[in-house]
Amino acid sequence: MKTVHSIAELRAQLDAWRREGARIALTPTMGNLHRGHLRLVEAARARAERVVASVFVNPLQFGPNEDFDRYPRTLAADAAHLASAGCDLLFAPSVAEMYPRGRDGFTTISVPRYADVLEGHFRPGHFDGVATVVNILLNLVTPDVALFGEKDYQQLLVIRQMVEDLHLPIEIVGVPTEREPDGLALSSRNQYLQPQERAQAAQLYAGLRRIADALRRGERDFAALCARETAALEAAGFRPQYVTVRRPDLSEPVAADRDFRILLAAFLGNTRLIDNIGLLEL
Ligand code: PAF
């Protein structure tokens, strides 16, 4: 696997592959890779002859009081993991390479349908930062297919909507969430958890499963269901921000619906965790 840091080197390699007629897949990441990311690379490998991964901790998608500075940066280990998962090219640009004129006045992509709800409500500007950097990466790589984890479910919808609205000829594939044996969704932020918090963190998935079971039994008082699990999380030491049942497109559900997406976000100590499940996927 080759690692490049500049857009010029990235383009040179991509041009060579395109001349060979290769189908190209992109897996954008912020690094600090875990098994979930490697599943993305494996899924990419199965769909294309050439797999490109990017590692870039994107300042545009972090709020002023968020963890941009302490977000774990582990490029050497990431490169080794990517190589063993079958990645062909790692693009690891600096902030200056990506945003040479700085952030002020920078062109922004916004997807208003999802920008201000749920994650967008609690992380203002976050999805503009995600959509903007993903659009840049898609433009630079022009892959045939790009893969994103369902752990960030709302992000996946933002990206699908952007690609549809901007008529980008790129297939967007969502890859199911990887979990620890106790159900905790894999996330780079799990390493912020103290040992005692790590043990508690599995309650998030347990809560999602309880809501899913109730929906499957036919319960349809969505507000009461979510209030019950919010209280359970509070009792277990979390500070929940939202626990919600939605349609798969995140619109409000009605009783006659058969498929739902159950999503939550909660602080455990100083760590903010998110998770979601789809009813029909279980
Ligand atoms: O999911 C992530 O790691 C990031 O939001 C992404 C898609 C790589 C954009 O920075």
Image (cartoon, rainbow, N blue to C red):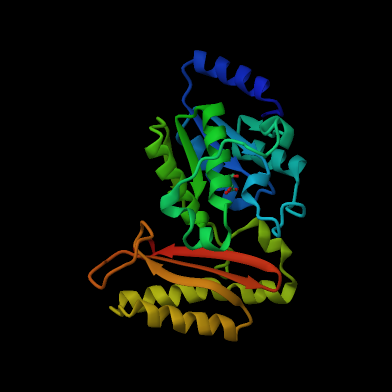
User: Which x, y percent locates residue 49?
Assistant: 50, 27
Q: Residue at x 77, y 55 (%)?
A: 70
Q: Residue furthest front?
A: 105
Vertical position of residue 40 compared to residue 224: above or below: above
Q: Residue furthest top?
A: 19
Q: Give left or right: position of 39 versus 223.
A: right
Q: Give left or right: position of 51 versus 4.
A: left
Residue 257 visible at all: yes
Q: Residue furthest left?
A: 256
User: Which x, y percent locates residue 242?
Assistant: 51, 71
Count of labels in the image: 0
User: Which x, y percent locates residue 124?
Assistant: 57, 57
Instruction: Compare residues 17 and 107 and report the one nearer the observer.
Output: 107
Residue 30 visible at all: no
Q: Quadrant of residue 96?
A: top right
Q: Give left or right: position of 164 versus 131.
A: left
Q: Residue at x 52, y 62 (%)?
A: 121
Instruction: Compare residues 99 and 185 and report the one nearer the observer.
Output: 99
Quarter in which the N terminus is drawn: top right
Vertical position of residue 154 compared to residue 12: above or below: below
Q: Residue at x 57, y 35 (%)?
A: 107
Q: Residue at x 58, y 52 (%)?
A: 126
User: Which x, y percent locates residue 235?
Assistant: 58, 86
Q: Quadrant of residue 194?
A: bottom right
Quarter in which the C terminus is drawn: bottom left
